[in-house]
Amino acid sequence: MHLLNKKEQVKGRVRLGIQAFAEALLIIPKAIAQNAGHDQYEYTTSMIPVGIDIATGEAMESKSLGIYDNYRVKKQLIHSSTSIATNLILVDEILRAGLSSLRPGGQ
């Protein structure tokens, strides 16, 4: 949710990148809610910086229940996901360049 608020402060292509990245990060809680049998859209509209109780589908404060996520693991996960997505886009660009060179006229 922080990234969605941050995008309002920037302009141009950077804003689109921030929005796309923020939406990609929301896929995880949406999938958790859907896999638990709850409405993913209802959850994300009421989403606050807490967890989801998969038994009820309600937002809950993880800390009050003694649930702590490892910050380093989450940070590395986001970094790795971003790197993988960047590499996939790069490979796609390389493949497109290779295919265009096979066409007559190189276009």
Image (cartoon, grey):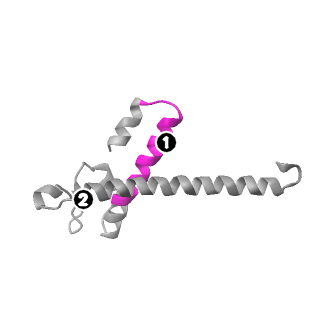
What amino acid type is highlighted by mark number 2?
A: Asn
| SS for callout 1 | helix
Q: Residues within 10 Å of mark 2 (few under 14, many from 20)?
A: few
Query: Is residue 21 rendered magenta in the image?
Result: yes
| SS for callout 2 | loop
Q: Is residue 103 left or right of residue 77?
A: right
Residue at 33% over, 64% down: 32
Q: Real-space Cα distance between discs 2 and 1?
A: 26 Å
What amino acid type is highlighted by mark number 1?
A: Gly
Residue 92: where, in percent of width, then height?
Answer: 64, 56
> Can you tell which of label 2 and label 1 is closer to the viewer?
2
Q: Give the total of numbered labels.
A: 2
- Give the labeled residue for mark 2: 70
Q: Residues within 10 Å of mark 1 (few under 14, many from 20)?
A: few
Residue 74: where, in percent of width, then height?
Answer: 32, 56
Upstream in sequence: badge 2 or badge 1: 1
Residue at 31% over, 59% down: 73
Give the residues drawn in magenta, as a range: 10-29
Residue 85: where, in percent of width, then height?
Answer: 51, 55
- Nearest the viewer among 92 and 51 is 92
Rendering quarter of residue 41: bottom left
- Give the labeled residue for mark 1: 17
- Nearest the viewer among 68 and 21 is 68
Quadrant housing the N terminus: top left
Chief SS of the magenta region: helix
Residue at 73% over, 52% down: 97
Q: Is residue 86 left or right of residue 59?
A: right
Q: Is residue 12 above or below residue 49?
A: above
